[in-house]
Amino acid sequence: MNIPVETLLLERGLLTERQLRRAMEFRERCPDKALEEILLDFGYVSEAALLACLGERDGLEVVDLSEDKVDPEAAGLISHNFSDQYQVLPIGIRNGKLVVAARDPLMFDVFDEIEAAAGMELTVVLAAAESIRDCAAAVYREQDLSNAVQKVNKEVQGSGHSREACAASERVEGTPIVKMVNTLIEQAYARGASDIHVEPMEDRLVIRLRVNGDLVEHTSMAMEAHRPIVTRLKIMGGMDIAEKRLPQDGKYRYDRGQVKTDLRISALPTIYGEKIVLRLLNSARDDCLMDVRRLGMTEEQEEIFERFIKAPYGLVLVTGPTGSGKTTTLYAALNRLVRRKINVVTVEDPVEKAISGATQVQVNVKSGLTFAVALRAILRQDPDVIMIGEMRDGETASIGVRAAITGHLVFSTLHTNDCAASVARLLDMGVVPYMAAAALTGVIAQRLVKELCPHCRREYEPDGRERELLGGAAPETVKRLWKPVGCSRCGNTGYSGRRAIYEFMEVDEKIGGMIQKGTSPHEIRTVLRKNGSKSLREQARDMTIRGETSMEELEKIIYSVE
């Protein structure tokens, strides 16, 4: 039965005659483009509806690759390039036949080629193009890494390379070690990892990635690979390969294909050898976060943030624990400010991203360039806006507060749980209450919350303890929650990224008076709630109820703010 798929779409009311006419007219102008592609591009039909019609017409099964496990051996029968080019992926063997997922069921020449290579008959099933690409990328990444690890293990086991010979080999691009390190960086980048940990253990070398804030084991290999990998990374970072007793730091710009990122490389001596941590910085994918509108704030929060940015002077603090996205928020603010005709100066440790139009100063404690020393020098540079990477001590806080009072707009970060606690922290650092009240324009507290993968999250009924933690949201009405499961699209983590949540405190006359009187953080929180400012706990709770995150993430937020 060779019924055109558009006929089936029309019969089922999934496509209108007018839409089909427009698609056909466009096809006349672009004859190389398939009609199905045009219908999808125009948004006239969904891919799920299209696949359902194709499956019904051709008597083929439609599969969801996010739920079906892919056999790596089956996938290995074709190359990654071949899979990408034709949108096909062998996913397993069923009843003695090779099961091949495909977007287009009519690619008979392609299927014949796979059949010849595999030496067995095929069973073709249908799958969405995006799921084929995502699944193939995950499977072949694992294979690439596995092959690289095997080559490295084969090369290093039983080798007796000298330090000089080892260093020389790690400068050659084609060596297994170099390929292994490149593969590792590219895979970490593809998974959205912020850090790569190369950790020597007693009997093996473990590679872990920090993804969505969690460290997950990526691979492991023979301990003999430790020395050449460390050597390679030290060479990349411009570090001393002979020095193994002291910590070292280095930098490297990685630019291969689609992967462009700055690496901050840190070496630390341990009882089993040097541990290397690579921080992925300044990547092209992070550029979107330089826009305030992409930070994930609500409309009301964006309006308050804009008022902070447009203030002629004052102190704006961004608070939260390490890894909560504070620097990203500050950079988004600075990116907006540098467009004006003003002098923007920053003092950071380290400078994580270059901002065109801003003067950025790197702290160097060894040479005596501390935050306090840099700030004093900056104040003589006619600044309009000053960004202090972190208020670490009373001296830095005092200088920052004075700068804010004397007509400068100052941005900085603190490590506190919420907005109200940041006021207490300033006072603990020796800032006089009336000066804190005069200087503070506003405070932003934030956290990063992991979002559940929409493809594999699982619904369940909450128990009594979970209902209690939800508190205040009419918990008796909450009939269901969702938990992470794991699939190929999320790297089997159950999560598909992180979202920032924010608490804002505008220092108006009332809040300023409370700060000046030394009012407790608890009383300030009470006033903020009465003014309609949602706490971090409330926002995380709402995300949980909507199925956007898990109870596990909610508990993390609860324990971090209390």
Image (spheres, rainbow, N blue to C red):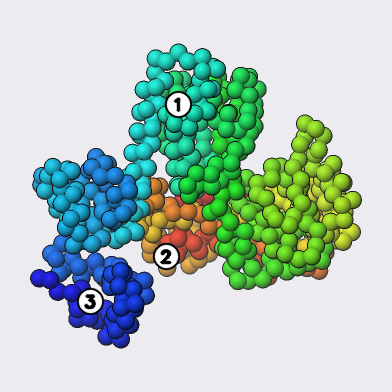
Q: Residue at x 81, y 38 (%)?
A: 369
N-term-proximal mark, 1 vs 3: 3
Q: Position of residue 255 (x, y in %)?
A: 53, 44
Give the crowd class for mark 2: few <14, some 14-19, many >=20 residues within 10 Å: some
Q: Is there a contact, CB below 8 Å, between mark 1 and mark 3?
A: no
Q: Name the residue under label 2.
A: 478
Q: Name the residue under label 1.
A: 205
* Left/right of residue 515 with respect to residue 140 in the rendered view: right
Tag 3's secondary structure? helix
* Left/right of residue 488 with respect to residue 317 in the rendered view: left
Give the crowd class for mark 3: few <14, some 14-19, many >=20 residues within 10 Å: many
Q: Position of residue 442 (x, y in %)?
A: 74, 62
Tag 2's secondary structure? loop
Which is nearer the eye, 437 or 378? 378
Q: Which amino acid does label 2 sit on?
A: Val
N-term-proximal mark, 1 vs 2: 1
How far apart are the alpha carbons under marks 1 and 2? 46 Å
Q: What residue type is labelled 1?
A: Leu
Quarter of the rendering occupied by the N terminus? bottom left
Tag 1's secondary structure? strand
Q: Name the residue under label 3.
A: 6
Q: Which amino acid does label 3 sit on?
A: Glu
How far apart are the alpha carbons under marks 1 and 3? 55 Å
Q: Residue at x 38, y 62 (%)?
A: 480
